[in-house]
Amino acid sequence: MNKIIIAIDGYSSTGKSTVAKQLAKHLGYVYIDSGAMYRAVTYFAMTKGIIDAKHFDADELISKLDDIKIRFVFNSDLGFAEVYLNNVNVEREIRSMEVSNLVSKVSAIPEVRKQLVKQQHAMGEEKGIVMDGRDIGTVVFPNAELKIFMTASAETRATRRYNELKAKGDNVSFEAVLKNVQERDYLDSTRADSPLYKADDAIEIDNSKMTMEEQLQTVLGLVNKVL
Ligand code: C5P
């Protein structure tokens, strides 16, 4: 069957990755979490002492970009691919609040974006891919056959993220999570390079009141119209 590229963009914690994973599984497609790539670069910079809450050396990070190797390795137990940074599984580390608090500053650096977009293009070469992020339908794959823009209220999103972090045993407050979601949305949609916005031809889905199954069925309906 004809394989396509499916781009899913939207604000932080709209549940894009949950739908994208299910969709990819259903279609037998590859799922790529582009946010994980920006998180991995951020985690790299933190562990090398290049950035922290008080110090941010963009030039040093740019000079080290060639030392960063990001790979996705499929974990059959989990049913999705995990992120490896220089051959180490960092799937858990990259989801911490420390990384979340710095990632939008890192992702605003044009050189970082250029490097990651190049890798994302290579991943999409054979199509049959579901990629989620902020600029997938606008910059990375402007010709994607299906573009979806997910939305949900900031409180709904912060609650989802808070529950996810709590379930993993992270000690975070709801207020800190809400603040992070709002700050990232602001930075991501106002940055100069590849800001987050809805592509003209993207279909908007507000999933605030939708179950996972309803979201999957809605998106599958859209895929069937394109195939
Ligand atoms: O999707 P996730 O919330 O994990 O993304 C983390 C951050 O990575 C975003 O807040 C944004 O700053 C950055 N990002 C981006 N472009 C993408 C995906 C993520 O700038 N395509």
Image: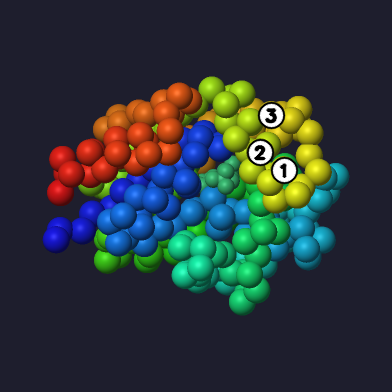
Most foreground residue, 171 or 39: 171
Judged from the image, the secondary structure of the residue bearing numbered disc 3 is helix
* Three-letter code for the amino acid on which mark 3 is drawn: Leu
Q: Please report whichever mark, 3 or 2, sits nearer to the chain's N-terminal start.
A: 2
Q: Which quadrant of the rendered structure holds the N terminus?
A: bottom left
* Alpha-carbon span between mark 1 and mark 3: 14 Å
- On the question of residue 195 being in view, the answer is no
Ligand 1 resides in the quarter of the picture at: top right
Task: Please identify, in this view, whether the residue under mark 3 or under mark 2 is nearer the observer.
Answer: 2
Q: How many marks?
A: 3
Residue extending farthest right = 54
Mark 3 crowd level (few <14, some 14–19, many ≥20, 10 Å Cα): some
Q: Which residue is more in the foreground, 173 or 35?
A: 173
Residue wearing tag 2: 163
**Callout 1, which amino acid?**
Lys
Which label is found at residue 178? 3
Q: Is residue 112 above or below residue 226?
A: below
Judge depth for marks 1 and 3 and give the one in front.
Answer: 1
Task: Tell me the tag on residue 133.
Answer: none
Residue 136 x, y percent position in the rendering: 40, 46
> Which residue is under mark 1?
166
> Do the CB atoms of the residues marked 1 and 2 lie less than 8 Å apart?
yes
Query: Where, by quadrant of the figure, is residue 224 drawn?
Result: top left
Q: Is residue 116 above or below residue 182?
A: below
Q: Residue 68 placed where, x, y %?
A: 61, 69
